[in-house]
Image: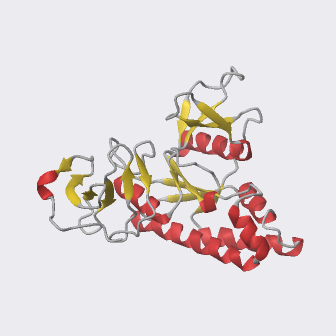
C-alpha cells in the first residue's frame, strides 16, 4: 500500500533550530542530513511511497533562518532537490476561516491549543487525503510541539457551522527510528508503540538499532525485535526480560530469557 508522507518544516521563531542556525549558518546542513535520512527510510520500505511538501512552508522556514536575502533562494532549492523528483509541491485551495486544534484526550478537562501557524497545512493534507489516500506527517526539527501527545486534530466546527463536525487524525513522526517502526507495523491497527497515550519514548540507547518505549501503566519497556521483525522484546521496570509480544501486543511469558537485560 502506498503511503503519502508530508514533510512539515518549523516556522515558529522560537524553534531551537533557528537559534542554532542564527549562530552558525552551517547548521542548515544538519537539516539536509535529516531530510536525506527520512527520505531513505520512506523509500526503503516501498519505492512507491510519495513525499509531499508545501512550498510556502519551506519558504517561511528558510526566511526565519536569518540568511541574508541573497542566500534565501539557494537553501530552498537545495531542500527541494534533497526531497527529489518524488516530492510534489502542494497547491490546494484552503478555507481562510478554518482553524485546527490539537486535542489532549488524556486530560480530565479537554484542553485545546490553536495551531494557527500550520492551519493551511492541515487543511491541505485533509483535502489531499480525500483525493490521494492516507497521509502521515514527518515532523522536521520539532516543527509541531507535540508535548508527548498523539497528534489528534480537529476543526473549529463550533464557531463555524459550515465546517464538518469531525476529528481529523494524522500520525506524526519525529524521528527516523519512529518512522521505521511505524512503516513496519502500520498494518496492525490494534496496537502500536507510537500510541502516546499508552507509551512514551525513552532516552535509553537503541536496542538492536531500535528505540525503547516505556509502557505508562506498567513501567514495562518494549522495543521491536530487529532480528525477527515480527515481535517485540518486553522487559520489566528493572530492565529484566520477561516476555516477547506479537505485533498485536499479546505477551508470551514463555519466551522469557533468563539473564537478558536492556543494555544501558
As drawn, 219 above or below 113: below
Picture quarter containing residue 191?
Answer: top left
Residue that lies at the very extreme toward the right in this rendered image: 69
Question: Of residues 216 and 6, which is closer to you in this image?
Answer: 216
Q: Position of residue 50 (x, y in %)?
A: 52, 58
Residue at 81 percent of width and 63 percent of height: 63
Nearer to me, 17 or 42: 17
The image shows residue 248, relative to residue 68, as above or below, that is above
**Front in this rendered view, residue 190 or 251:** 251
| Residue depicted at 15% across the width and 59% down the height | 256
Whether residue 27 sits left or right of residue 41 in the image: it is right
Q: Is residue 84 visible?
A: no
Q: Position of residue 154 (x, y in %)?
A: 60, 33
Residue nearest the observer in this picture, 161 or 257? 257
Left or right of residue 196: residue 120: right
Residue positioned 77% across, 65% down in the render: 62
**Colour convention of the picture:** secondary structure
Q: Residue furthest left?
A: 254
Total marks placed: 0
Q: Quadrant of the C terminus?
A: bottom left
Q: Please give the name of the residue rendered at 52% of the width and 71% of the height, measured from the top-left corner.
A: 37
Residue 216 drawn at (x, y percent): 39, 46
**Could one spot residue 59 in this view of the protein?**
yes
- Tell me residue 17's x, y (percent): 69, 66
Check the image and report above or below for 167 versus 123.
above
Amino acid at each position: 500500500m502506498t503511503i503519502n508522507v508530508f514533510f512539515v518544516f518549523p516556522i515558529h521563531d522560537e524553534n531551537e533550530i533557528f537559534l542554532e542556525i542564527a549562530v552558525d549558518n552551517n547548521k542548515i546542513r544538519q537539516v539536509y542530513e535529516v531530510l536525506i535520512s527520512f527520505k531513505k527510510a520512506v523509500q526503503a520500505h516501498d519505492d512507491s511511497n510519495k513525499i509531499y511538501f508545501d512550498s510556502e512552508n519551506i519558504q517561511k522556514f528558510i526566511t526565519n533562518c536569518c540568511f541574508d536575502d541573497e542566500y534565501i533562494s539557494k537553501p530552498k532549492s537545495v531542500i527541494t532537490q534533497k526531497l527529489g523528483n518524488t516530492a510534489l509541491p502542494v497547491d490546494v485551495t484552503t478555507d481562510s476561516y478554518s482553524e485546527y486544534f490539537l486535542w489532549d484526550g488524556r486530560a480530565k478537562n479537554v484542553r485545546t491549543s490553536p495551531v494557527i501557524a500550520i492551519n493551511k497545512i492541515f487543511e491541505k493534507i485533509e483535502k489531499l487525503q480525500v483525493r490521494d489516500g492516507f497521509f502521515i506527517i514527518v515532523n522536521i526539527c520539532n516543527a509541531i510541539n507535540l508535548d508527548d501527545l498523539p497528534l489528534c486534530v480537529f476543526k473549529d466546527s463550533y464557531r463555524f457551522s459550515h465546517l464538518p463536525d469531525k476529528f481529523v487524525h494524522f500520525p506524526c513522526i519525529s524521528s527516523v527510528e519512529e518512522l521505521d517502526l511505524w512503516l513496519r507495523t502500520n498494518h496492525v491497527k490494534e496496537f502500536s508503540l507510537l500510541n502516546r497515550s499508552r507509551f512514551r519514548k525513552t532516552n535509553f540507547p537503541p536496542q538492536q538499532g531500535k528505540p525503547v518505549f516505556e509502557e505508562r501503566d506498567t513501567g514495562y519497556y518494549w522495543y521491536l525485535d530487529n532480528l525477527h521483525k515480527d515481535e517485540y522484546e518486553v522487559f520489566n521496570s528493572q530492565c529484566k526480560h520477561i516476555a516477547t509480544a506479537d505485533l498485536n501486543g499479546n505477551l508470551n511469558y514463555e519466551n522469557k530469557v533468563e539473564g537478558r537485560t536492556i543494555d544501558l
